[in-house]
Image: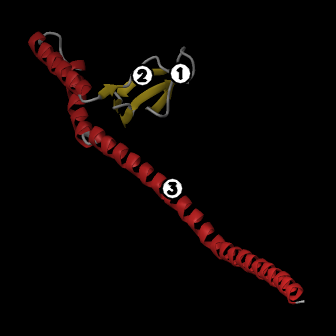
Amino acid sequence: MLREDNGYRNIMVDEENKHMESNANTETDIEEHEITDELNPQREEIKKLKEQVLRLAAELQNFKKRAEKEKLDASKFAISSFAKDILTVRDSLQLALDNCDTADNKIVEGIKLTLDIMDKTLTNQGITMIKSIGMTFDPNVHQAMNQVESDKPQGTIIAVMQEGFLINQRLLRPALVSVAK
């Protein structure tokens, strides 16, 4: 009978061990589940922080690009104020040339040469004259001073009172013009 009792005991011990293992597995599963549940908010937070870091990196890159563009623009257009003042001198030379008597050939020649040198210097600095006569009025580069009856199509520029200029393709000074009605 002892043997049978031992066999019974062994079976009972095996059953108890299985039950304990089952409980241990269940407890381990529960603990893992609890740990996973506890980690989910941290995982979400990490995901949000990664997205935020990526956005900030993109913003920084955009800022660097903008700063570089502004630096280039500042160097390109730094002479704008000076250029406007020089255009006044150019206007005076052009006015002198337009009102010169052809009898003073040497003076006219000197003014033409000076005006040519000034125009080349302006061009070298990225300053170009706006072509206006015969063109259609463009409010972006022209300023209409008056409208005149003309046989030309409406909106055509028929006279220029003051030349307009661009600096590196940006308006420096609009052309003052007369436009056909």
The mark total stands at 3
Three-letter code, disc 2: Ser
Q: Residues within 10 Å of mark 3 (few under 14, many from 20)?
A: few
Q: Is residue 171 above or below residue 132?
A: below
Q: Nearer the viewer, mark 3 or mark 2?
A: 3
Left or right relative to 163: residue 144:
right
> Which quarter of the rendered picture does the C terminus lie within?
top right
Q: Which mark is residue 138?
A: none
Q: CA distance from mark 1 to mark 2?
A: 18 Å
Numbered disc 3: secondary structure: helix
> Which quarter of the rendered picture does the N terminus lie within?
bottom right
Q: Which mark is residue 54?
A: 3
Residue at 53%, 60% (x, y): give it: 50
- Judging depth in this view, the residue of 137 and 145 nearest the camera is 137
Q: Which residue is mark 2?
A: 132
Three-letter code, disc 3: Leu
Numbered disc 2: secondary structure: loop
Q: CA distance from mark 3 to mark 1?
A: 63 Å
Q: Residues within 10 Å of mark 2 (few under 14, many from 20)?
A: many
Which numbered disc, 3 or 1, marks the residue that appears first in the sequence? 3
Three-letter code, disc 1: Glu
- Judging depth in this view, the residue of 43 and 171 nearest the camera is 43
Instruction: Report the colour scheme.
Output: secondary structure
Q: Quadrant of residue 8?
A: bottom right
